[in-house]
Each structure stands twice: as structure tokens, then as C-alpha cells.
Image (spheres, helix red, strand yellow):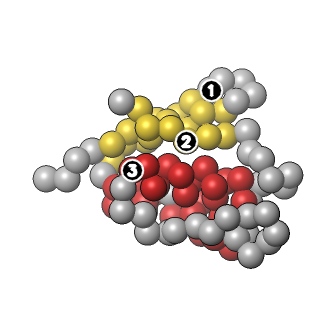
Amino acid sequence: MSKSFTIAKTNSRNSSSNEFTGTIDELTNMFSYTLDCGRSWQHEQGNVKINTNPRGIKSLIKNLNNSINNSAANGWSNYSYVEVI
């Protein structure tokens, strides 16, 4: 049985948050569109490379945060992902 993790997506503007629970594979499939969008913008100047198949929860959160910042209009998104313990 795989370990289950919980990720919270928070908005810095109004402090709202959503929680998502699942294994690494389930969360990667759930956020595959976000990772693909960030990967499509990684060739632009100032953007970072995105791993669309992370192995750990820290790597998944790092790639999600980089993905939303890559695809944001001004390079910074109001959202951030954190692990809920």
C-alpha cells in the first residue's frame, strides 16, 4: 500500500485554500495539466525546467510551484502549493 499525502493549494490574495489527497502517482495524474502547462513555457527566458514525472512529494510540490509561475502572465502566480502534515 502506497503512502497517501495531502497537498494544499493556497491563494495569497484572499487566503483561501483547497486540499488534495492521494499517492504520488494519483497527485501527479491529478495535476498533469498544470505540469504540462509549466513545461510548455520552460523555454522562455527566466523560466525553469519542469519534471512532469516527479518521484517524491517535495519534488512534486517544487515542480507544481514552478509550473504555475512559468505559465503566469507576469512570472509570479498568487497560488502556492504546500504539503499538509
Q: Look at mark 3 in the image and give the residue it sits on.
A: 57
- Near mark 1 (Cα within 10 A), the count class, few <14, some 14-19 or many ≥20, is few
Q: Which residue is mark 2?
A: 81
Label 2: element kind = strand
* Nearer-the-camera pick, 80 or 46: 46
Residue 28 visible in the snapshot: yes
The amino acid type found where label 1 is placed reads Ser
Question: Percent position (x, y) of residue 38?
Answer: 66, 64
Q: Which residue is mark 1?
A: 16
> Sequence order check: which comes first, mark 1 or mark 2?
1
Q: Residue furthest top?
A: 15
Describe the element under mark 1 as helix, strand or loop: loop
Of marks 1 and 3, the one in the foreground: 3
Q: With 77 as the anchor, is 7 left or right in this view?
A: left
**Mark before the other along the chain sequence, 1 or 3:** 1
| 61 in relation to 19, above or below | below
- Mark 2: amino acid: Tyr
